[in-house]
Amino acid sequence: MLRIAVCDDNNVSCVSIEKIVKSAFERLMINVRTVTHLNGITLMNDHCREPFDIIFLDIDMPEMTGFDVAETLRRNFSKCIIIFITSHSELVYESLDFQPFHFIRKSCSIPLSESIPKVIEKLADHMQINERIILEDDISGRCAVHYDEIIFIKGDRHYVEYHILGKEEPVRMRETMKECEEKFSRNNFVKIHKSYILNLKYLRTINLSDSDITLKTGGRRLPVGRSFKKSIDEKYTLYLRSMS
């Protein structure tokens, strides 16, 4: 689960941005935990206790500006993703010193309800492209695999099999399905059966009447558990909307 902060000294603006951010991540089926801060000092105190993955940060704030926060984060080699949200568009070039992911303008013809979700979609793509997981078994050895390359995961008692794009044999690891659920709670993965977790990218069709799904890769069919039918249908609908 991603830990996200929204920091803006205007309480109305801060609450509004948080709602937009949370809604945008929910549409992408990415689990997040959001908190708000009205100044940079409390934000940094919170970050020191438990680091944030992403911060939506106002620049013009009293005592500790957004640039002060960003400078502190970078000086401490924090990998936290910074997205500036400000009405001071003239600061865009100065903000580049702090390696932000994006700069969103408040006073713009495009409302925040549109601009923020677009940036979050780009961020989600960026995270999926760059994020890898290390897998290892006796056959394949140790390999780094992009999350996006995992087609599905099959549970088998105390082991799980990772079925990966381009690999004929799955990577078999000693791991539980519960651990996999937590590890793949974000990105486009959904549990379709007590023994299967699927990457929605590879879903071709849902056959609820036959209680199975068909994959794009080779037309393979996987079982769908009765209790998972509704959530699969809902999450796949959200996934298709996010791709449009």
Image (cartoon, rainbow, N blue to C red):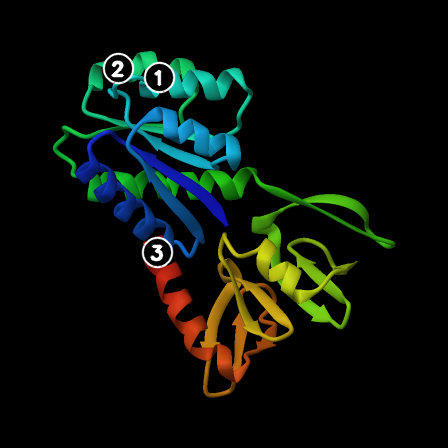
Q: CB atoms at circles 1 and 2 under 8 Å apart? A: yes
What is the x, y in percent for residue 211? Answer: 52, 84
* Mark 1 surroundings within 10 Å by alpha-carbon count, few (fewer than 14), some (14 through 19), many (20 or more): many
Q: Read off the residue under disc 3.
A: 27
Mark number displayed over residue 3: none
Q: CA distance from mark 2 to mark 3?
A: 31 Å
Give the residue type that dot 1 points to.
Phe
Q: Which residue is mark 1?
A: 67
Task: Classify residue 61 as left or right of residue 224.
Answer: left
Of the residues under marks 1 and 2, which one precedes in the sequence? 1
Query: Which corner quadrant of the image does residue 107 belong to?
Result: top left
List the single residue furthest toward the left.
109
Q: Is residue 173 left or right of residue 205?
A: right
The part of the image, by quadrant, that contains residue 88 is: top left
The kind of residue on which mark 3 rests is Arg
Q: Marks 1 and 3, Cα distance to the nearest angstrom?
A: 30 Å
Among numbered discs 1 and 3, the one appearing first in the sequence = 3
Residue 244: x percent and y percent?
Answer: 32, 54
